[in-house]
Image (cartoon, helix red, strand yellow):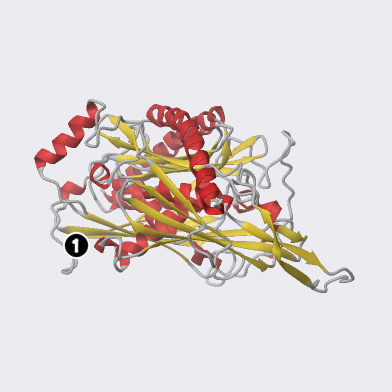
Amino acid sequence: MSGKGGSAPHPTTYSPSPQNQKRPKSLIFKDNVDWVRPDGRGFQHCRPAFLRTGAVNAASGSAYAEFGNTKVIVSVFGPRESKKAQMYSDIGRLNCNVSYTTFATPVRGQGADHKEFSSVLHKALEGAIILESFPKTTVDVFALVLESGGSDLPVVISCASLALADAGIRMYDLVTSVSVSCLGKNLVIDPIFEEENCQDGSLIIACMPSRNEVTQLTITGEWSTPKIHEAMQLCLDACAKLGMVMRSCLKETASSQE
Amino acid sequence: MVGLSLGEKHFIQGGIAQDLRSDARKRLTYRPIYVETGVIPQANGSAAVKMGATEVIASVKAELGKPTSLHPDKGKVAIFVDCSPTAAPAFEGRGGEELSAELSTSLQQCLLGGKSGAGAGIDLSSLSVVEGKICWDLYIDCLVVSTDGNLLDALGAAIKAALSNTGIPRVQVAAGATGDEQPEVDISDEEFLQFDTSGVPVIITLTQVGKHYIVDATAEEESQMSSAISVSVNRHGRICGMTKRGGAGLDPSVILDMISVAKFVSEQLIIKLDSEISAAEAREEE
């Protein structure tokens, strides 16, 4: 989808390149301040983000996001009539679901234990959507993690808000989300799978950058207050930058449609 | 869940703004906490906690299991919450399941630390029996008996009380097992080791109503909340986990302010809870 291998002699076939198969076992030295991250990034460098809207034709709006190896597709359906069994509501409903493909994780089918992601996604988005604008109806947000490469939840949240914007759902602001891992003394932003697996703590922020409001915040592990402060600043900074990338992606789509 | 008239809503909001809540509490005052330990004889440890009309039970069961390959020197802890429909009709079917899943996830985040096991409130390395082969698996099951708001704090307190009530049987490992063989063990039914709970944090939920935030919100107050954050703080004033509920966004500076308030409240709560737990255990021994 990112247009890799476009110049191959047989564009209709695809064979996986051998170096993708072996995964170099990289060590993470927690107490060392000078270690290089497995993918060569600096501690405060996010992975390059690739974002596209309109990935699914049948949906009202959809988006595809690729942050390093993390690949996510989100489609938004609706607003459509709420199910008959549900009570009358003068504000709209938001229904979120996050699922993993069976091949998303190194061990097959391991993504099933991420049930709580759906409720976190719901909580991260509901504060940003103007639910009053579609009474009696439901908006469905379905996210599918195609490949889990670390920081899945932040990518899902950012991608979902992009898909909502693509669907023309009225929002106060885009929701962007970034996570930070605490490894020993170091804070690393946008951790990859290997880093997440040995982290001492994590902090995930979802925020509306132009309103400077945090819609969701999750912390695990032991933190001191100054460290939380530092990590939050780091995340909010990255969120603001990601917001600009997302905005330019939306503008690009809009201008290409004209 | 709670049907309130407009007048009642204004009364609650106005009271909170004036630092005098419907039950005469101040914004940062908890309801009286009542702890009873050893309520479930079949479990290794158990406790019931009452905070006003909120009542929860936590039980700890220990079973021998195999440690994961990632952490061969650590035991495993699983936390489950069950919201019985006997507590509230809203807990029937999917509503209860969702709340149960949300509460268990929040408790795991608040008590079990990061993926590497660092910063965990429950000391997992003390659960190891034979490195890489045998460890204790703790199953913490919580039941919501009746609900009047602030479930997460009550569950956190119940787990802390249940763990301090937990005795883990002493295990004799038969010598002579070599290599990949699974060593034979003898579980003593007389000697129990007290579980160390000094590092277990307390959970403080700050509920934002209007411009102010309150601790230990009742169900009526919770229905008026715009957002709430739950912070778990240990004895040393370190943050061990945090989750946010409610849709409304919060300014980052407000969150930092809430964290410092939670730290301040936690000191009193830890002292209060410790004395309640020791009083409950003294009662049990009588």
Q: What residue type is labelled 1?
A: Arg
Instruction: Please state the horizontal and vertical placement of residue A258, each as a whole percent of the image.
Output: 25, 48
Circle 1 SS class: strand
Q: Which residue is drawn at 54% across and 42% down?
A: B201
Question: Can you give x and y, in whole percent of width and height, for residue B271 in the image?
Answer: 51, 34
Q: Can residue B47 be seen in this view?
A: yes
Crowd class of label 1 (few under 14; some 14 to 19; many from 20; radius 10 Å): some
Write the residue at 44% across / 51% down.
Answer: B155
* Between A174 and A62, the one nearer to me in the picture: A174
In which quadrant is the N terminus of chain B drawn? Answer: bottom left
- Looking at the rendered structure, the number of numbered marks drawn on it comes to 1
Classify residue A221 as left or right of residue B207.
right
Residue A66 visible in rendering: no
Q: Quadrant of residue A78?
A: bottom left
Q: Which residue is drawn at 63% across and 63% down?
A: B137
Q: Name the residue under label 1.
A: A80
Q: In this view, does B181 lie to the left or right of A45?
A: right
Percent of width and height locating residue A218: 46, 44
